[in-house]
Image: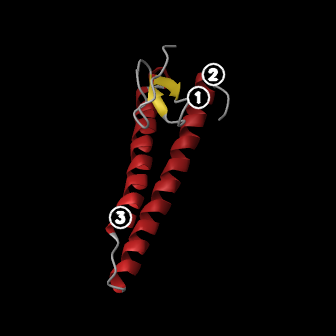
Amino acid sequence: MSPTPTSPQETNSELIAQRDRLIEQFATLQSELGGLFYEMAIRDHVVMEVLVGRAAELQRIDTELAAVQRVLESGDSAAGGNCPSCGALYARGAAFCAQCATPLSAP
């Protein structure tokens, strides 16, 4: 995990980079999920547990992307930091991480 940014410009740049990485991950996972379902379907052997697991990972990325986007849209003062457990971005004043439910210490 990278050190805490010191300036608003650095914070904004890191958030934009994080957003771009998440967008790329989301697109890749979405494409892979579609391809996986297609391959299962043409073989008439759809394994829902596998698809649900992949969809859950896609949803986790989508949730994290939405959090980053909200912080970017609301300005630098909304970001509280990154979860020490999973690294997900959390809003200022949050008591628990939205991704992993780790208690967050007050700044």
Frontmost residue, 12 versus 27: 27
Image x and y of residue 21, in percent:
55, 49
The answer to whether 85 appears left or right of 39 in the picture is: right
Q: How is the protein colored in the picture? A: secondary structure
Residue 14 image-quadrant placement: top right
**Mark 3 or 1 closer to N-term?**
1
Dot 1 crowding, Cα within 10 Å, few <14, some 14–19, many 20+: some
Q: Secondary structure at mark 2?
A: loop
User: Residue 11 shows which numbered tag?
Assistant: 1
Residue under the image location 39 percent in, 43 percent down: 63
- Foreground: disc 2 or disc 3: 3
Residue 39: x percent and y percent? 41, 80
Residue type, label 1 = Thr
Is 50 in front, or is 13? 50
CB under 8 Å between callouts 2 and 1? yes
Picture coordinates of residue 41 (x, y %)?
A: 33, 80
- Give the residue number, with chain letter if any, for mark 2: 7
Tell me the distance, in whole angstroms, between the alpha carbons under discs 2 and 1: 6 Å
Amino acid at the residue labelled 2: Ser
Is disc 3 in contact with disc 1, using a CB cutoff of under 8 Å? no
Pointer 2 or 3: first along the chain: 2
Separation (CA) of disc 3 from disc 1? 39 Å
Q: Quadrant location of the N terminus?
A: top right
Residue plotted at (52% across, 30% down) = 83
| On screen, residue 105 above or below 59 | above
